[in-house]
Image (cartoon, rainbow, N blue to C red):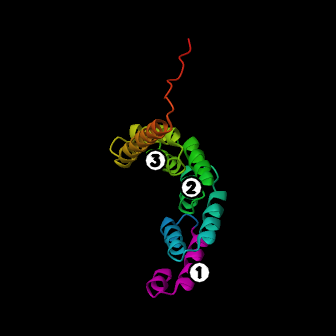
Amino acid sequence: LAKIFLRGAQAAKAEHHYKEVLRLYNEDESARNTLITLYVKQKRYEDLTTFVKNWLEKAPDDPQRHYRLGIVYEFKKEYDLAVTEYKKAIELQPGNAKMLLALGRTYMKTGRISESRQALEAASQADPALAEPQLLLSSVKNSSQSLKKGVRKKNKKSGKKQVAPKKTT
């Protein structure tokens, strides 16, 4: 019934029926994913956040639920909250390439390059067949090289000499 309302562009009725399905069959992944998609399409981000948080509260040790909440926060550009959720997900399921990738991507968006590189390298090691960590790693390397070149140019223009860091023994 919920699918019929959704196809008929009756989002409010579809939402009601999907919620009813979830009330009766709490773990119906199809209903949950469709409801999440509905909230995103309607740009109802606060409803989306509340929905995913409530779902997480029912199983706080489920790494997938922390990961999904992290995605919601990343989507909303609430990066610190996304990082917290991704870290919790990784703590509960170490070595998960998707979660490590998401953490690395979020670090990259906030300019935390060394942390991004570390997470992306771990994602690549966890699943060598996954292409995105390698693509993002090359982007991280290019951006850090550009940053170094920019600093050198700035120092050259200002007449400052670059000083190598002192070695400690």
Camera-side residue of 103 and 3: 103
What's the distance in space between the residues labelled 2 and 1, CA to CA? Answer: 25 Å
**Quadrant that contains the C terminus:** top right
Q: Residues within 10 Å of mark 1 (few under 14, many from 20)?
A: few
Q: Which mark is residue 101?
A: 3
Q: Secondary structure at mark 2?
A: helix
Task: Answer yes or no: is residue 5 visible.
Answer: yes
What's the distance in space between the residues labelled 1 and 3, CA to CA? Answer: 34 Å
Q: Residue at x 59, y 68 (%)?
A: 48
State the residue position of label 1.
Answer: 16
Location of residue 1 with respect to 112 vertically, above or below = below
User: Answer yes or no: do the residues labelled 1 and 3 have beta carbons within 8 Å?
Assistant: no
Q: Earlier in the sequence, mark 2 or mark 1?
A: 1
Q: Secondary structure at mark 3?
A: helix
Q: Residue at x 34, y 47 (%)?
A: 131
Q: Is residue 124 left or right of residue 55?
A: left
Name the kind of residue labelled 1 in the image.
Answer: His
State the residue position of label 2.
Answer: 70
Q: Which mark is residue 136?
A: none
User: Answer yes or no: do the residues labelled 2 and 1 have beta carbons within 8 Å?
Assistant: no
Q: Secondary structure at mark 1?
A: helix
